[in-house]
């Protein structure tokens, strides 16, 4: 065999082997390598004692995922002051009992929740490449409806407050916290106008919660005075590049805010992070804990839950 041809074939074989190894890692190792992220966020009124907020998002659960269920149950050991479930708990018709079992130890703590599209509709097989270009969900024509009302009833029975297009005030210890939320903007079920209004003047902080962080939801929340915004949906890009990060967010959020903590203000979507005004809100987007059963891979984007420690702002 010609030496050049042999070298080329060896290179192709090596690249193919690396590709297979990468897919195996993304499908077997990383998507089950759960992480707890911790951030400190200065959003409380001066003089307020710290509050610990646990966010759980995007389980996309099917009943056989016992490891994921048990990992979530173990989060109760953190003893948070508040639990925020930001949606997309389900990925199968029979997943509600598993989702409620996962959350059951967390019902010991005050909590709020919003729903995502995959609490309403089952995932479907589709070309994964569409995820790289799509920013908005299509109308769910022909999709199987999931038992969302059973999930909602279970969360409510556990003592959690439904924040789908709703506003509430909770007292966490001796601290008053206002929360406002929307139903899923990805399938256009959000109606922030129905619950909009100035932030409470007596609460230590107003927190906005939504599943999919579309700018049409984030901007008016900030304009009304919310200092912390909490969302999920993006999966942190799910497939990211080393030293670069997310390629997509599956909404109109910029990729540099696909996960983690950043600043947000009206107009932030077209401005660099360095342009944040001093009074900009804080935004936390969870990369979530699961994936669609039809795209069970993660790369450079571990599944996660997050513990946010809220402290007084300067």
Image (cartoon, rainbow, N blue to C red):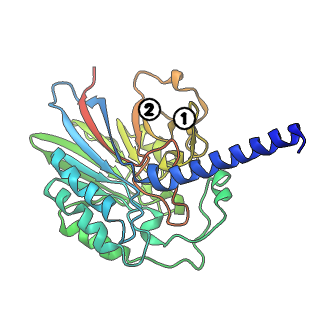
Place residue 175 in its image quadrant: top left
Residue 291 appears at what percent x and percent y?
47, 58
The answer to whether residue 203 is seen in the rendering is no
The answer to whether residue 48 is seen in the rendering is yes
Farthest left residue in view: 174
Residue 68 appears at what percent x and percent y?
33, 59
Place residue 35 in its image quadrant: top left
Please identify the quadrant where the N terminus is shown: top right
Labels 2 and 1: the sequence-earlier one: 1
Q: Residue visible at 21% across and 48% down?
A: 82
Q: Residue visible at 69% across and 49% down?
A: 16
Label 2 sits on residue: 262
Mark 1 crowd level (few <14, some 14–19, many ≥20, 10 Å Cα):
some
Q: Residue visible at 49% across and 73% down?
A: 122
Q: Residue visible at 26% across and 73% down?
A: 153
Residue 210 appears at what percent x and percent y?
41, 52
Q: Nearer the viewer, residue 18 or 126?
A: 18
Label 1 sits on residue: 256
Residue 40 appears at what percent x and percent y?
29, 30
From this view, report whether residue 168 is shown above or below residue 66.
above
Relative to residue 197, is residue 4 drawn left or right?
Answer: right
Q: Nearer the viewer, residue 265 or 82?
A: 82
From this view, report whether residue 250 is shown above or below residue 188.
above
Relative to residue 23, is residue 37 drawn left or right?
Answer: left
The kind of secondary structure element at disc 1 is: helix
Q: Nearer the viewer, residue 55 or 310?
A: 55
Q: Dots 2 and 1: beta carbons under 8 Å?
A: yes
The kind of secondary structure element at disc 2 is: strand
């Amino acid at each position: 065999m010609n030496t050049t041809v042999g070298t080329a074939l060896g290179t192709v074989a090596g690249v193919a082997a690396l590709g297979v190894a990468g897919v195996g890692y993304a499908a077997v190792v990383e998507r089950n390598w759960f992480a707890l992220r911790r951030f400190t966020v200065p959003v409380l009124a001066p003089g307020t004692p710290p509050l610990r907020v646990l966010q759980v998002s995007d389980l996309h659960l099917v009943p056989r995922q016992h490891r994921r269920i048990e990992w979530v149950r173990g989060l109760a050991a953190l003893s948070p002051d508040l639990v925020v479930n930001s949606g997309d708990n389900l990925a199968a018709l029979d997943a509600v009992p598993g989702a409620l079992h996962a959350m059951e130890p967390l019902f010991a703590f005050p909590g709020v929740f919003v729903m995502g599209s995959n609490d309403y509709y089952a995932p479907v097989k589709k070309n994964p490449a569409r995820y790289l270009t799509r920013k908005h969900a299509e109308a769910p024509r022909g999709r199987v409806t999931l038992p969302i009302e059973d999930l909602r009833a279970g969360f409510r029975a556990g003592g959690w407050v439904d924040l789908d297009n709703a506003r509430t005030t909770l007292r966490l210890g001796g601290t008053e916290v206002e929360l406002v939320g929307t139903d899923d903007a990805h399938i256009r079920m959000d109606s922030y106008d129905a619950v909009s209004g100035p932030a409470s003047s007596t609460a230590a902080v107003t927190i906005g919660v939504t599943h999919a962080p579309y700018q049409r939801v984030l901007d008016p929340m900030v304009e009304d005075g919310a200092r912390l915004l909490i969302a999920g949906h993006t999966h942190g890009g799910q497939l990211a590049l080393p030293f670069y990060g997310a390629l997509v967010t599956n909404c109109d959020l910029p990729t540099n805010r696909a996960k983690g903590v950043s600043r947000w203000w009206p107009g932030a979507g077209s401005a660099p992070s360095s342009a944040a005004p001093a009074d900009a809100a804080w935004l936390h987007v969870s990369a979530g804990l699961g994936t669609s059963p039809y795209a069970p891979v993660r790369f450079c984007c571990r599944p996660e839950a997050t513990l946010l420690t809220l402290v007084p702002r300067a």
